[in-house]
Amino acid sequence: MAAPVSIAHTHVHSLRVASGAEALVARVLAKDGTAGFGFTLNLDAGVARDMAAWDALAQAKGVPLWGLLGGSHRKVANISMDELPAIPADWTALRKDILDGRHELLRIDPFAWGSVEMLQTIAAVANAFDLSIALLAPNAHPWEIQYCAALAATLRGEDTRIIVRSSLPENSIPVSGSKGIGIDWSLEPSFSKIQWQS
């Protein structure tokens, strides 16, 4: 299910990021003309479109994603290195594991789960069982880390953190207070060269 915004047009474009990896970048135009952007490095265009739809809705409302979803502003999101795998994107298995008490910390890759709604569902269940959530930025790309920070601010509790699988020089990232999802698209020079269709 996409964000509750009336979409007039969607365009997905493939580009090479500075590391050489391929990214899918989506632009959603809402019927009111507001543009939203999303991306994924896992080549699932649905993730990029969902993110872009939520960005367009938050842009149209003039609020950051965390404000749109009833989160609380945090100045920073903590980043830590973790070699443990993220929980596979299988709702039935995760629900059973939670009910069986197999997790104290849910390591969630928001790009594998596919939508903001699914992450919000997992967060609601985690809250009911007093579990913490760590959001995985699977490639430690700055866009992924910024998106995870925006999502972390939508979740209850101050202990939500971002996990990466490689060492980074910083151990925290500011949570954007700008409207939308708060990603600095200029971090990848190829983004500005995309020729979007109308």
Image (spheres, rainbow, N blue to C red):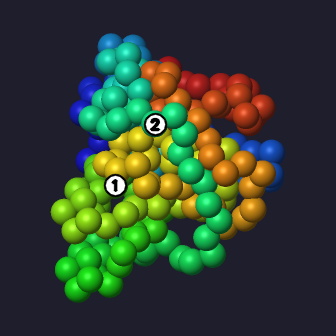
Task: Report whether 39 appears left or right of 14.
Answer: left
Pointer 1: what residue?
119
- Up the image or down, 98 lies above or below 30; here it is below
Label tally = 2
Q: CA distance from mark 2 to mark 1?
A: 18 Å
Residue 79 at x, y = what percent?
60, 54
Q: Residues within 10 Å of mark 1 (few under 14, many from 20)?
A: many
Residue closer to the observer: 177 or 110: 177
Q: Residue at x 62, y 46 (%)?
A: 172
Please identify the quarter of the rendering in which residue 67 is found: top left
Residue appearing at x 24%, y 59% in the figure: 127
Q: Amino acid at mark 1?
A: Leu
Secondary element type, mark 1: helix
Could you say whether the residue bearing mark 2 is in a helix, strand or loop?
A: loop
Left/right placement of residue 93 relative to residue 179 reads left
Location of mark 2 (residue): 74
To which quarter of the image does residue 69 belong? Answer: top left
